Amino acid sequence: MPPAVLNSLPTENPVSISAVAAHAGVSVATVSRVMNEQSGVRAPTREKVLASVAALGYRMNHLARSLRTAESRMLLTMVPDVGNPFYAQIVRGIDTVAREHGYFVLLCDTGADEGRERSYFDLLRMHRADGAICLDPDTVQHALSHESINLPWVACCEFDPGVAVPYVGIDNHRAASDAVAHLLARGHRRIGLINSDKRYLYARQRQQGYLDALAGAGIARDDTLMRTVQGVDYEAGSAAALELMAQPDAPTAIFAVSDTLAIGVMSALRQLGKRVPEDVAVIGFDDIAVAAQIAPGLTTIAQPMRELGETAARLLLARLADPQAQVPGVVLPHQLVLRGSA
Amino acid sequence: MPPAVLNSLPTENPVSISAVAAHAGVSVATVSRVMNEQSGVRAPTREKVLASVAALGYRMNHLARSLRTAESRMLLTMVPDVGNPFYAQIVRGIDTVAREHGYFVLLCDTGADEGRERSYFDLLRMHRADGAICLDPDTVQHALSHESINLPWVACCEFDPGVAVPYVGIDNHRAASDAVAHLLARGHRRIGLINSDKRYLYARQRQQGYLDALAGAGIARDDTLMRTVQGVDYEAGSAAALELMAQPDAPTAIFAVSDTLAIGVMSALRQLGKRVPEDVAVIGFDDIAVAAQIAPGLTTIAQPMRELGETAARLLLARLADPQAQVPGVVLPHQLVLRGSA
DNA sequence: GTGAAAGCGCTAACAA
DNA sequence: TTGTTAGCGCTTTCAC
């Protein structure tokens, strides 16, 4: 049985600034001043206005304000996959800072539909968002090679220091070589790499870090130990690991460039009857929460996710506050977290 | 060394509809008609306008349109934690449908800041979003008990069939008793429950399902086997499991109302030297992707996450299209997924 | 300290 | 078929 319709305030909110002005017996300009907490309004007048606001239940129409002030107070955030915990944490960091500064976050999942990259930047051009933070390597790459360079946005995680777009990320080369150095220290000589597509800067940097660490130990590059995957989900990691292990001279350790990949690797290894780390050591990247929950715990390169997001938001806000400002690129520290898998 | 500033289009886009009209030698009304693909514009005129649009690089200011049409084409989505893969999948479902209908999703993380519940609904009142989907039990509860009932929103996952707000979710009572029935069938008699706070409807329903299944097997309620947790993260699950197992008459099986909780439980059990499922069986809820990756695989109640999100979006869109329409509540099927943990 | 009035860029009557 | 015009609700000079 459908419940009775409850009595309450009307759905529509027809209370405009002029209604408040009329109710309070002042002009709309005064109401505007009060709403914006500007000085130059006598206390009694302010009280009157506030009383009317309360009485009428007035809420400002931010659309109108945005049209007037030409700012939407929205920050666009483009992520390749909201479902990936790595990005989710970064988004929380962005959200925190945005909120502190009176902005809302408009989150767009760029991975959800292909071939529409440009349109998200259009949100900026259409004034639906004041600025953007891009976490998607594909979109970053695309934007860097187009006129989007001049739009108010910052790159997070995937970035090109040589282009005039503010960025925040980690030293991918260093991080990867740290991971491999650890494996080397444990005596491994045949170390597999499961990497993202080389079209991404971060993938190339991590591969180079891997290669350089190997070279430092006098180990020559062996392409049969390197695999490229298209996504970073569990299944991709499993599939790549299966390929790697099916070879005659299989690796004794695997470095995957994301924890989700690494967890997929461990899953595949288990399927193969291999023990981790005794038969094959595994090391991941990111340090998402679940890495500490599984058995064995996943050894990984931790990225400061929250801080990455917070910094990205701050850089963007700085750029918005002063479009001329030289917003720097910032590289945050990573950390090798030792657990049981390697 | 900073790169040379590249030549390109200006950051600002001062091209307004009147500029296009002037360039094309027509009125703004005609430009508007063309932009909105309305009929009643001769082909040659349309061509002229389109040419000017291209020449000037015109992008419509949606803020202005929204102000005029009183719709923002934004859908607000409130989630308690974007980092939880369960919500992330639902959000993807929402995003898919929203996009298909020309809407963008404004994602707000209600868990990120306490005591601001109301303000998100204000986004509706301020016309920054046309409608909202609420996935946060706390916010749903709060909204149901306030005037927000009349705002255009729908509840997802947490809902009250007795209130006139459209909803989509699963049969929590049934799902929980299905889970417990499985444990019972495996011979367990002392079954622990790790549940969310009773202030949530879904938590009460799942508890009742648990209790009813037990009663059906002639097992009396035993409060020492029931634990309430405040969050649903891994740590909360671990802590609750540790408590449960520290008791003299510890359970031989544990049902946790979310996979993240259940994974935390398994982690704690391992710490205690207990084997899963031999010493203690574990069953979760949601079927997030990682549930299939861990060892042993997590037996769980699968919720149709994508579909939950898609349905929520469709219900909301229906309500927006016709505010008078009687939008139904929909209950989607769940499914017991058997893996190694129970 | 407060008000009148001019728009921000767009859509939708209404005219022509 | 196309143009003219009046706002949408707000901020912001510029007067008073």
Image (cartoon, coloured by chain):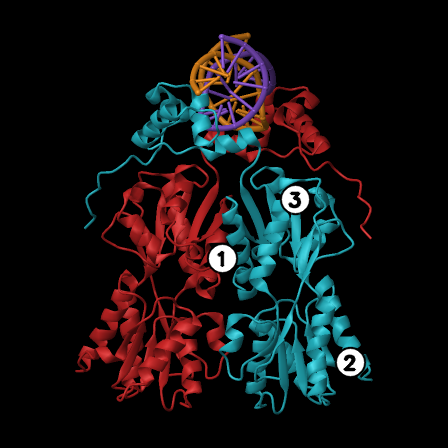
Chain colours: A red, B cyan, C purple, D orange
Q: Is residue A190 left or right of residue A307?
A: left
x and y, in percent, of residue A314 in the image: 41, 49
Taking the image as shown, residue B92 lies to the left or right of residue A235, namely right
| Residue carrying label 3 | B319
Which residue type does callout 3 highlight? Answer: Arg
* Location of residue B157 in the rendering, given as x and y in whole percent from the top left corner: 65, 60
Q: Residue B214 has which mark?
A: 2
Q: For residue A174, which quarter of the picture?
A: bottom left
For the point 54% across and 43% down, the residue is: B74
Which chain does the numbered disc 3 sit on?
B
**Along the line of sight, which residue is nearer the eye, A149 or B161?**
B161
Where is residue B160 shown, x and y percent of the image? 74, 56
Task: Give the labeled residue for mark 1.
Answer: A92
Q: How far apart are the two marked residues, 2 and 3, measured between alpha carbons? A: 40 Å
User: At numbered mark 1, what does the secondary structure look like: helix, strand or loop?
Assistant: helix
- Answer whether labels 2 and 1 touch (C-beta < 8 Å): no
- The nearer-to-camera label among 2 and 3 is 3
Q: Is residue B241 above or below residue A286?
A: below
- Helix, strand or loop at mark 2: helix
Residue A110 lies, in percent from the top left, at 42, 54
Mark found first going from the N terminus, 2 or 3: 2
Which of the chains bears the disc numbered 1? A
Amino acid found under the numbered disc labelled 1: Arg
